[in-house]
Amino acid sequence: MKQNFIFAFALLATLLMVNAAPYQLDKRTIKFGKCPGEDGKLPLLDVTVSPDPLEKGKDFNVTVSGPLTVDIPENSMDWIRFFDKDYNPISFFNFYGDFCYDQRHDIKCPVKAGTKFSTVLTGVFAPDGDVAATAAHLRVLIQDTNPEPDVDIACTMSEKIVLV
Ligand SMILES: *[C@@H]1O[C@H](CO)[C@@H](O)[C@H](O)[C@H]1NC(C)=O
């Protein structure tokens, strides 16, 4: 009888944990969607940020995942940028990196269309002070730098954010 009780308790605990998992996903406060303008036609990157919500003046990490419907060729760059509520870029808070960086062990360019990938972009920080109050959107963009001029190949922009 006692064993049955323990079993029932373990089952209940498991059910509660299974239930809690989707709830934790919902707690992801920053949601990403299409970029405004022409870039709205581009394939969407799946993006999460850590910490979420973003903290004023603090470093954060951006996890970028796919598959995409397009290839990410060698010499692609990633751009992470803050925008104000009217989608005007905020100067200075614009970070770029070599997306295909050799030492990024989790991906290898070209990343062919349809290939699952996930990588973390670091070295990014959020505005502080007065500028923090104007930051309303975060955009993650990947550009192919092989053509001249560069071509945007994938993009996503957050819904309204508030830095804490
Ligand atoms: C970002 O990722 C690096 C490497 O995984 C880790 O050391 C660092 O603590 C992370 N920073 C944040 C703000 O999550």
Image (tube, rainbow, N blue to C red):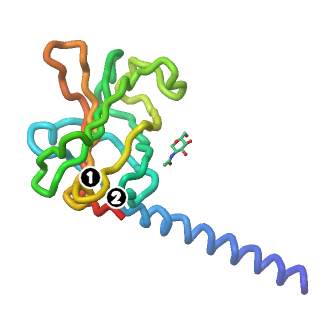
Give the answer, above or below, for where 127 lies relative to 10: above
**Looking at numbered disc 2 in the image, what kind of residue is underneath it?**
Ile
The part of the image, by quadrant, that contains residue 19 is bottom right
* Residue at the spot 25% in from the left edge and 21% down from the top edge: 144
Where does the N terminus fall, quadrant-wise?
bottom right
- Between 144 and 116, the residue placed more toward the observer is 144
- Residue linked to disc 2: 30
**Looking at numbered disc 1 in the image, what kind of residue is underneath it?**
Ser
Please give left or right for residue 161 compared with residue 11 in the image: left
- Between 49 and 10, the residue placed more toward the observer is 49
Secondary element type, mark 2: loop
Badge 2: how crowded within 10 Å, few (<14), some, or many (20+)?
Answer: some
Badge 1: how crowded within 10 Å, few (<14), some, or many (20+)?
Answer: many
What is the CA distance from the residue labelled 2 to the residue labelled 1? 7 Å
Please give left or right for residue 139 compared with residue 11 in the image: left
Please give left or right for residue 61 compared with residue 156 in the image: right
Q: Are marks 2 and 1 in contact (CB under 8 Å)?
A: yes
- Residue linked to disc 1: 158
Give the answer, above or below, for where 45 lies relative to 146: below
Q: Position of residue 35 (x, y in %)?
A: 18, 45
* Residue at the spot 9% in from the left edge and 37% down from the top edge: 38
| Residue 87 image label | none
Secondary element type, mark 1: strand
The part of the image, by quadrant, that contains residue 156 is top left
Q: Position of residue 150 (x, y in %)?
A: 18, 20
**Does ligand 1 reach within 8 Å of label 1's beta carbon?**
no
* Residue at the spot 39% in from the left edge and 58% down from the top edge: 55
Total labels: the figure holds: 2
